[in-house]
Amino acid sequence: DVKVTQSSRYLVKRTGEKVFLECVQDMDHENMFWYRQDPGLGLRLIYFSYDVKMKEKGDIPEGYSVSREKKERFSLILESASTNQTSMYLCASSYTVSGQGEKDTQYFGPGTRLTVL
Amino acid sequence: QKEVEQNSGPLSVPEGAIASLNCTYSDRVSQSFFWYRQYSGKSPELIMSIYSNGDKEDGRFTAQLNKASQYVSLLIRDSQPSDSATYLCAVTRGMDSNYQLIWGAGTKLIIKP
């Protein structure tokens, strides 16, 4: 079974703090993703990475950065946390991103619920 | 117009009945379609994927795809209380967008015992 883990389930931070969210997958997947999920808005892609040290902006990258130094690990960084970044953050991984086929299936970690005060 | 649209619900279905969940999408180049289930406070988990027009069955679940109408649905037969969850539809974008998934906001399904 694919296993994706995230460093924290719940996190409370103060405005202006630098926040690190870490994600690790154990299936040797090439692709990793960071989403945020807010009620009524669905999942929105923040960043994704298709290889070590490679990253692409998603739909809402502003206020975030990412790091992928090892294939199994993908970190999301909030440079200066703000209250509008209070959300559920979900990490996912997939074997391929080809537009076709089972190997595009994304597997999710348990999520980190971040509250910024 | 949203790229992937789902009725937010809640959709209330009696136990043992068929639950029908619908999803429409706007990008004609989309090739892969996924249904995920998400329990409250948990992360999404894959239920089914479908790539060709027609029906695909897996146990109590059937996914239906009609690319001409840009419509994908999920049928759950013999609904159980444990099927109560939010169901997310996800659709791939085209090559220009790196085949990323676009997600619907989800339909909340409630199975009444």
Image (cartoon, rainbow, N blue to C red):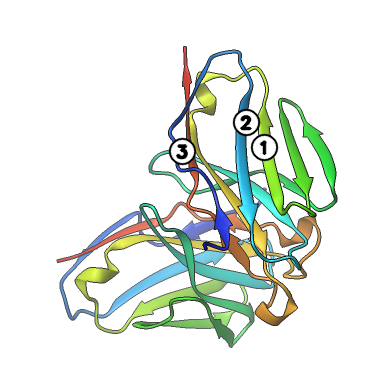
Which numbered marker is on residue B74? 1
Q: Which residue is mark 2?
A: B20
Which numbered marker is on residue B63? none
| Residue type indicated by callout 2 | Ser
- Tag 1 secondary structure: strand
| Residue type indicated by callout 3 | Tyr
- Tag 2 secondary structure: strand
Residue at (72, 73) in percent of width and height: B94
Marks 3/1: CA distance?
17 Å
Quadrant (top left/top right/bottom left/bottom right) for the C terminus of chain A: bottom left
Marks 2/1: CA distance?
6 Å
Q: Nearer the viewer, mark 2 or mark 3?
A: 2
| Residue type indicated by callout 1 | Leu
Percent x, y of residue A48: 56, 76
Marks 2/3: CA distance?
18 Å
Pinpoint the chain carrying mark 3. B
Q: Quadrant of residue A6?
A: bottom left
Q: Which residue is mark 3?
A: B39
